[in-house]
Image (cartoon, grey):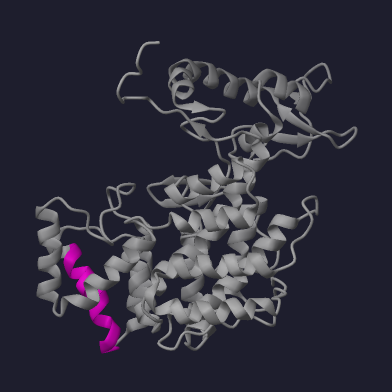
Amino acid sequence: MLHNAPVKTANGKNDALISSRDALAMLGVKPQTLYAYVSRGLIRVAPSSADGARMYFRRDVEAVTAKGRSTRAATSAAERSLSWGGATVMHTAITFVGPGGPVYRGQPALDLARAGRTFEECAELLWNGALPKEVPMWSAPAVPQAFTSYARVICDVAPNNTSRHLLALVANAYIATVERDGPGEPGRHEREARQLIQVLASAFGLLRPKPRLVPPAAPDSIATLVAKSSGITASSPVIAALNACLVITADHELTPSTFVARIAASAGADSMSCITSALASFEGQQNGLGCDECEQALLGAGSRKAYLATIARSLAERRPVAGYNHFVYPNGDPRGEYLLEIASALAGNRADTAWMVAWIATAREQLGVRPTVVAGLVAVCAALGMPRRSAGALMALSRTAGWLAHSAEQRLSGVSVRPRARYIGVSAPER
């Protein structure tokens, strides 16, 4: 909780508050780390009545310092042995993952989704640390004519590529043709991010039976762009469902792809290159690849009995089952349960999609598997009538917001992520 006035002691002095310089000296950290402590609620801040400079509560700073001393000895040796300039456990003020799902800058993602927050609001929260007072409407991107040449080629190869590969192709084509801001331009990263995300939202047209790629020419919400490019009606229930999917998957702390984005940022890559780097690694069981495999298992089973038999066989052989049993959530992924509720409401009595939600529920009841956000996304996309491969694309599109937030935070830290390797090969010959 932030205090709006200094705290005075009996002698009338503000002994309970210390300046930014004193706080940094006590903590022995950079300003970015101090701000991270504040955003996480570990250190309270109050404005000075004299010059408006930030003042910090001494007792909070002392508590963080004491905690750091008690844990530093146990972790510093391991961190030194495994990293140069970066720690095995990275400090972040962006996202925390708990039993209730991810928490963005202190805001539970599921609460944001249930409150009807838009993806744009969620992205601004991740990037700037606060929810905007009004729903943002991003300016339409300026797409150069040269992009259309790339678009034709991408449409030709669309049927033979995963959705993540297609998003990466679109991103690279846009980066290669658009006029970029200068390195020192204020707000450059957020401005470029908003434009790129809108272009990527139009890439859902590549998943249609007849692939198409038409970037937006006018301002529109990301959920609306996804619906239109997917070829479905952008009704209120559709937009609400898409925003829910986008909001709860926007970030998930330090996933492999997010780590890749941070490594790229620490090496000096710009924001757009961090996105393409992360997309290249978005192929795990709990994200893009998992969405494709979960969808294929459902659509290819032919019957509920066959589907359950496939899952049972994987469990017996101790193989991972796409769409189930996220290791981060041993008691069940709350994001998956929430999306399945949305999918069930959307499907209603539609025989072409209701069966999918029913099969997932049966697998949970009869086999004890716990649906993840992957199964939830697949079910929602099917209930909305979106093209196949949409679930993995939707998750990748959403995660761009988190990747951009993490790459910016890493860049501000000024630290190069350089893990150490423990050599176990043949001993070098003696000289």
Quadrant of the rendering where the N terminus is positioned: top right
Give whichever of 156, 3 is nearer the camera: 156
In the displayed structure, would residue 72 be above or below residue 114? above
Visible residue check, residue 239: no
Residue at the image point whose x is 59% and y is 20% from the top: 65
Visible residue check, residue 283: yes
Q: Residue 335, percent across and down?
A: 38, 60
**Residue range highlighted in magenta:** 350-364
Q: Residue 318, percent across and down?
A: 14, 50
In the displayed structure, would residue 330 be above or below residue 337? above
Q: Residue furthest right?
A: 50
Q: Is residue 294 magenta?
A: no
Q: Is residue 241 left or right of residue 139?
A: left
Q: Is residue 153 left or right of residue 208?
A: right
Q: Residue 426, percent across and down?
A: 30, 23
In the displayed structure, would residue 152 be above or below residue 407? below
Q: Is residue 322 left or right of residue 42?
A: left
Q: Residue furthest top?
A: 431
Residue at the image point whose x is 63% and y is 69% from the top: 174
Quadrant of the rendering where the C terminus is positioned: top left
The prevailing secondary structure element of the residues shown in magenta is helix
Residue at the image point whose x is 80% and y is 53% from the top: 186
Q: Is residue 223 left or right of residue 182?
A: left
Q: Residue 175, percent across and down?
A: 64, 64
In the displayed structure, would residue 331 be above or below residue 151? above
Residue at the image point whose x is 47% and y is 15% from the top: 73
Give whichever of 343, 138 is nearer the camera: 138
Q: Is residue 351 magenta?
A: yes
